[in-house]
Each structure stands twice: as structure tokens, then as C-alpha cells.
Amino acid sequence: MGPAGRVTPVRRCALILGLLAALPQQGQAAGEALVYAAPERAIEAVEARQGVASDGRYIYAVDNSTIGKYAIATGTRVAGFAGDAEKFPHLNSCTLARDELVCASSNYPALPFRNTVEFFDPQTMEHVRSADFPAEPGSLTVLDWHDGRWWAFFANYDGKGGAPGKDHRHTVFARLNPDFSVAEQWTLPDSVLKRLAPSSISGASWNGDGLLYASGHDKPELYILALPESGTVLRHVGTIAVASYGQAVDFDPAEQRLLWSIDRKKRVAFATRLPAAGEARR
């Protein structure tokens, strides 16, 4: 407790973690017994509405046109970016790659789709440059650097922000060329699409185990995905129940299985140590 009985941010986060630890060890969304991974750390961040990224020392909480930089050791906000909402209408997921904070940005829910990649200096939080996408197969929600290449999710939706003639089943995962054009693409398996409906993939991050961990828009679960040996449909390896409700996620580069995610209603970023993929169920 702080002065005059005020609950401090650190104490509030401790209370949140205590409540989350008491949740049933099962998948809340579908009712089946899933492996549940409880968060081990929480940081309050007013910008935690679209997602979070981590460089091992700091987290970067993302809102539509703002980003807050917080020290992991103390939870203190140390810097930030506040952009023009017309130029940055919908920042989605971010990741640290090649000494830059790189963010997927879209014009959601406007149509036709217009996606950009936004580059920031993580030290100063200054915007450095933008890059346009030459093709728009959907609304860009995820951009991640893995195995020397860029990878992306292009979301499609059943309702708000959905393009005519398309729905969540038209969500695309793609390996990109250096100019951000699509080199190869895959669709989601039915077992994941059923859980996402009517929304789409909102976040995803490659892990050191060679698997992709994806989150939807509002369900408390992660989908473990793998590239297929053949064909154009991703393989659903397993599902992990978590405390956060969708949105963008990012693995901590300092700890292979430590995943950062958010609870947008509580404006909190969580660090969750995930079990091995072999322990998860579909």
C-alpha cells in the first residue's frame, strides 16, 4: 500500500497475478482441459491495448498510435512515442529486429486495405521510416523476423473491417520477400479457424523451437502452428490456455519460452512461461 492506503502499481500487479493464479487449470473459452500457463509477471502500461514487444530489458506496449517503453526490472515507463492518429491509425504488433522496433500497421477498419511497416529507434522512440506493402491480401496484424526473413499475418474478418466476399477463413500467413511482397503463403487449419470465428489472428511470434505461437482477438488461448511439409495449410500442433485475451504477443529474446502478452481491459502486460509444445493439446 502507498500513502493514505493507496494501492501502488506494483501492488496492483501482484494482486492481479494472485487472482490469475487461482483460475481453473483449463481452457476457459472452449471448456476442454487444456494446459494452462499462468503469468509470472505483470506490468501496468496505459498503452497496452493492441499488443506488446520485448527486447529482454524493456517492453514496448502498443496502442493504435502510441507506444510506451517500460523497464522490465522496475515496471517504470522510461520513454514513449505519440503519433498522429491520421498517419498511424492502427499500429498492431511490434517486434525488435536488427536494432529497430518494427511494427505492423494497417488502416483497420477502413477499406480497401492499406498496410505499412513502421520503423522506430528503440533508444529514442523516434519514428525512423515507413515501408508500404505492394499487395494487400488482408489487414496486416503481424510482422515477425525469423530465420533471416520477414513473416506476416494478413487478417480477414466476418464483420467490421471485413472485405466484401471474404471472412476470417481468408486469413493468410506469408513469408515475405525483402520488398515485403509475398513470397509464399499458407492458410489456417479448420481446427484454428473454428476457434477464431468471427475474428482472426491478432498476434504471433516465432519461438526458438521452430514453432509459431499465435493469438486471436479475444480468447484466452495460444495456437501453436507449424509450416506443413507439403501443401498450403498450416499444421495445428497444440493449444495453450493463458490469462490474456488475444492481441499481439512477443517472445522475450532473453528467455526462449517467456512470452509477453496483454490484457487490454486491465491495461497490463503479462510475462508467461509457456510449457513445451509437446505438453499442449489441440
Image (cartoon, rainbow, N blue to C red):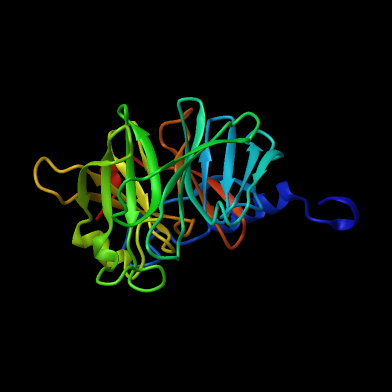
From the top left corner, tell me how far across and down residue 58 is, in percent.
Answer: 60, 34
From the top left corner, tell me how far across and down residue 255 is, in percent.
Answer: 46, 30
Query: Is residue 218 positioned above or below 42 on the image?
Result: below
Image side of residue 23 versus residue 68, left or right: left
Image side of residue 8 versus residue 198, left or right: right
From the top left corner, tell me how far across and down residue 110 is, in percent.
Answer: 44, 65
Instruction: Name which residue lies at 34% across and 31% down.
Output: 208
Query: Is residue 256 positioned above or below 141 on the image?
Result: above
Q: Residue furthest left?
A: 230
Query: Is residue 207 positioned above or below 31 on the image?
Result: above
Instruction: Name which residue lies at 48% across and 56% down.
Output: 243
Query: Is residue 85 positioned above or below 160 on the image?
Result: above
Image side of residue 72 versus residue 96, left or right: right
Q: Residue furthest bottom?
A: 159
From the top left corner, tell me how far across and down residue 37 is, in percent.
Answer: 43, 49
Say which quarter of the image contains residue 219.
bottom left
